[in-house]
Amino acid sequence: MKTIGLIASGKIEVYTFLKYIPEKKKLKLGPFDVYYFKLNGYEVFLVISDKRMTSARLATSLLIEKISPLLIVSFGIAGAIEEDIQVGDIICGNSTTMIENGVFEQYIALSIIPNEIRKFILNLVVEQKERIFFGTIVTVNGEQAIYDYDKIRFYHPVLDMETLGVAQAASRRKVPVFSIRGITHSLAVQSSSNIHTIIDYTSHYNKGAAIRKILTHPWLVFKVTGYFIVKLKVSAHIASTLYSLLQVLSIENKSSDNEPDYQI
């Protein structure tokens, strides 16, 4: 059976996607929760990571060691850093890098998009008027990169916290990675002191700093409800797009003399 690995960055994204999957089994992979199901002739293993690059890298490594997937799909949310990318848009990553202290530490090309996925995306763009772009996913490893977002010069770049970790683990084992991100906020419009940055970024690096920001900007508390509403809407958009994408996906199986053990 052909296998695909999904690496999710948050529980909201996972449970929104799993609404499309009526039959699934919950497993365990090291410290991570995993959901197993079958779709479009594939065995799919969805790993719930978190918004840290190290966790995403570990989750990817463990998954590859266990199931030898044909493809790893990383999905979640991200922040735009260009004014023409709007909330609700989708970015399909064609490359990923990391910025730390103003320096780009690594650059990894992501999977070449198969023809059937390109046709599927083109159909969404042309016929359903969806806003889907290809671009570079910049993984941040600290707040300074967020504040320096205006210095980033890539094609349709967005900021996340884990894609590079997935790509690092997969590239060493020559497993292709497809990354898809839904935009929940734009730094170009909202600046770096918005509620999404504080909850999705700052709190994961320095909870004390996140609390201080909210205390010194009490008006942000009134935006927490809006934060969850936007995240739920964008997660639903990502979920439906990913589910449809997996249904049209067709990739060749690797030749192997031994049948792998899929027990986790």
Image: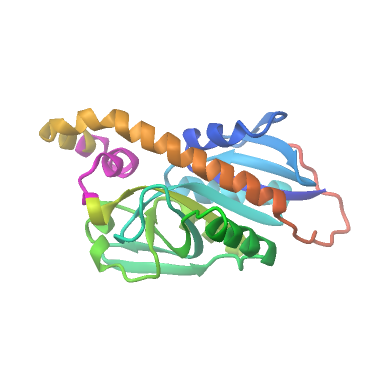
Q: Which colour assignment does the render follow?
A: rainbow
203 part of magenta stretch: yes
Q: Residue at x 62, y 53 (%)?
A: 72
Q: Residue at x 80, y 47 (%)?
A: 41
Res 204 quadrant in image: top left
23 versus 175 height, above or below: above
33 versus 149 height, above or below: above
Q: Position of residue 190 (x, y in %)?
A: 23, 49
124 versus 225 height, above or below: below
Q: Nearer the viewer, residue 243 or 47?
A: 243
Q: Position of residue 205 (x, y in %)?
A: 31, 43
Name the dominant secondary structure of the magenta segment: helix
Q: Which residues are magenta?
A: 190-209
- Give the left or right position of residue 153, taking residue 7 as reference: left
- Give the left or right position of residue 215, taking residue 163 as reference: left
Res 26 quadrant in image: top right
Q: Residue at x 24, y 32 (%)?
A: 223
Q: Nearer the viewer, residue 127 or 231?
A: 127
Q: Residue at x 14, y 30 (%)?
A: 218
Tell how many labels: 0
98 part of magenta stretch: no
Residue 175: tell me if it is visible.
no
